[in-house]
Image (tube, rainbow, N blue to C red):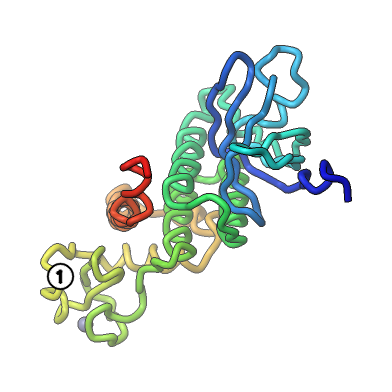
Amino acid sequence: MSRLAERIYRTEAVVLRHRPYGEADLILTLYTPHYGKLSAMAKGVRRPASKRRGHLELFTRAKVMLARGRTFEQVTDAQTLDANRGLRGEDLDGQEQVGIAYYLAELLDKTTEEGQENRAIWDLLTSSLRALSDGINPAIVARHYELRLLGYLGYQPGLFDCAGCGEPLQPVTNAYSVELGGVLCPECRSQDPAAEPLSVNALKLLRLLARERPETVARLRFGPALATEVEGVLRQSIRRIIERDLESPAVLRSLRGE
Ligand SMILES: [Zn+2]
């Protein structure tokens, strides 16, 4: 193989983030099925005549050709596979979906390291963006994504057995413990003073989100109080793992510039 051929490879990718660089370039944060997250430079794509730009919009799933570079991979070609047109934000109806799409991308960026393959997360990302683009209830897509992402990162909250005594949870008001990573029965609730009450319906909704596709959950009716309760629980768990990452030796080293 020639040296150039060794340097070039193809992959599918979703554009999670992009920022301008120099006069006409973009630095992209991509998520890929086999290499996880990676950074890549797309040269010249901010010029009006660039043909590649349209294939590298945020939240687009594309087939890209990359060349290994010293600091960044370089995007040498890009072809759209799924433009997720519902996330282009051209009309006001799309605004909430677009906001959630930014949130999903940011969450993934914050909770994953570069170069770590995770097929389940790839599938979750692409199906969630598709669901948002198709107009599925954005709040349901977001909660489903948060819960599944926690699981795929190794922090699946226990929703069936008590995180204290291990007994099956009963349909009563239990408590959710971020620290213990799951639900505590009334007897064990004092094991975590910070644990907050979790209603019967909130536990049901969490179990549904863990099992079903967002399209299925979105067909059910539930009130704003329940949605808020479940959102609070998942947000706290997500925040906890981001804080845990921020305390990790690798992050502290990079903050110190080593
Ligand atoms: Zn218990």
Question: In terms of image quarters, where does ligand 1 lie?
Answer: bottom left
Reading the image, the residue beneath label 1 is 192
Along the viewing direction, whichever of 221 and 175 lies nearer the viewer:
175
Question: Could you tell whether 172 is left or right of 22 in the image?
Answer: left
Residue drawn 78% across the image and 44% down it? 8
Placement of 99 over or under 183, stated as above or below: above
Percent x, y of residue 210: 46, 66
Percent x, y of residue 81: 75, 41
Residue drawn 71% across the image and 12% down it? 48
Question: Could you tell whether 185 is left or right of 22 in the image?
Answer: left
Placement of 198 over or under 42, stated as above or below: below
Identify the image quadrant of the C terminus.
top left
Type of amino acid at the residue the image marks with label 1:
Asp
Query: Is the distance from the Cβ of mark 1 to the nearest ligand 1 atom less than 8 Å?
Result: no
Q: Secondary structure at mark 1?
A: loop
Residue drawn 21% across the image and 69% down it? 175
Along the viewing direction, whichever of 96 and 179 lies nearer the viewer:
179
Percent x, y of residue 252: 31, 49
Question: Could you tell whether 39 is left or right of 169 in the image?
Answer: right
Question: Is disc 1 surrounded by few (<14), some (14 to 19) or many (20+) residues within 10 Å?
Answer: some
Q: How many circles with numbers are drawn on the protein?
A: 1
Question: Could you tell whether 258 is left or right of 40 in the image?
Answer: left
Residue drawn 78% across the image and 34% down it? 77
